[in-house]
Image (cartoon, rainbow, N blue to C red):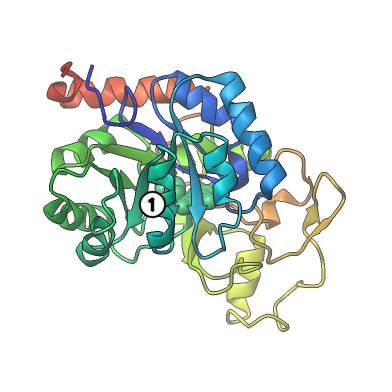
Amino acid sequence: MAQTPLCEIPILQAPVASAAGAHLCAAVSNAGGLGSVSLTWRDEEDTRQILSNVRALTDKPFYANFVLHFNPTHFGVALDAGVPIVTFSWGNPAGLVKDARSAGTKVGVQVTSAESAKRMLELEPDFLIAQGVEAGGHVQSVNPLTQVLTDVVSVAGDVPVFAAGGLATGADLARMMHIGAAGGVFGTRFVASTESDAHPWYRSALVEASPLDTVLTTCFNGEWPNAAHRVLQNSTYLAWEAAGCPSPGNRPGEDEPTGFTAEGIPVPRYDNAMPRFDMTGNHEAMALYAGTSIGKLGSVIPAANIVQLIWNQACAILPEIAVTE
Ligand SMILES: Cc1cc2nc3c(=O)[nH]c(=O)nc-3n(C[C@H](O)[C@H](O)[C@H](O)COP(=O)(O)O)c2cc1C
């Protein structure tokens, strides 16, 4: 079997915010892929807790992501807790890479063009992630993945590049590896897995939707204004769009929460929180992040089966990637 520099099977579970807890992360890593947790919106205590929970479930490598639009005040806590790999998106981690190196932590950086890749390569990362505009969640890229990947691979030299955005199948992975990717990053596919912390209604909606149901928008801008995100078109989005995409203060239904967190805190209608399994209310009206891979997700199955299915399909198409190195 091919050995990637990071894990046994070159399938990375994308950071998918609160949809990935320790169980999903560990399930992917235990299956030979690379699971992840998003640490951006966690405090120090939460960070220690989730990293310790992952470690209790797997002794395989995994990674933690920081979105650098937000200040990573707890980055040192993650390093002290021994996180083996970190990735950064939406910013330049120049000041953080040295600390990661000193802690023996590998570093990956998300890029969206040859120019951004060249800038990030100056930091000597262990790997790059090339994100395309097809991605679910917040979308840093404006160009299609095949273009971004081709451009990034052309400047990356020996640094492995992983492809992210709209991938769901082994054929997708084989296509990316044929272009030169070291592997694929799958977000939406793992949100629709058994171990995901996404609400069961949201997981079903993902597997039942068609690719035309996603839209790139700035509709759900609570806590992170003006950052484009790809979501399923739902009642909140359609009412906002029909009203001419008005600014905060003039948006349809913005005084009515769409639901409540497990702690009973109201979820504002245009909040960027996705429906977690422990939220109550109108899940359909919340931010339903989804990449263009919907329509080819299959059903909600265990993460280990997803890894195996994608890998078996990819190896059948590109047998050379399965060769032991
Ligand atoms: C629900 C959800 C949450 C996400 N949260 C993050 C995040 O916290 N940090 C980040 O860098 N990317 C985040 N992303 C984007 C992913 O890293 C990745 O680029 C994307 O999932 C790839 O596209 P796909 O969903 O079509 O597989 C998120 C994506 C989704 C679907």
Front one among 319 and 112? 112
The percent coordinates of residue 211 (x first, y second) are 42, 50
Q: Quadrant of residue 181?
A: top left
Q: Is residue 194 visible?
A: no
Q: Is residue 181 visible?
A: yes
- Taking 110 as reference, is 45 above or below it? above
The percent coordinates of residue 42 (x first, y second) are 66, 49
Give the crowd class for mark 1: few <14, some 14-19, many >=20 residues within 10 Å.
Answer: some
Q: Cβ(mark 1) to ligand 1 < 8 Å?
A: no
Q: On the rendered image, what quadrant is the N terminus found in?
A: top left
Disc 1 marks which amino acid? Lys
- Taking 255 as reference, is 68 above or below it? above
Q: Quadrant of residue 93?
A: bottom left
- Relative to 107, 17 lies left or right: right
Pick out the residue farthest to the front.
102
> What residue sits right under mark 1 in the picture?
98
Q: Residue at x 65, y 67 (%)?
A: 223
- Taking 196 as reference, is 162 above or below it? below
Which element carries disc 1, helix, strand or loop? Answer: helix
Q: Residue at x 60, y 44 (%)?
A: 77
Front one among 161 and 79? 79
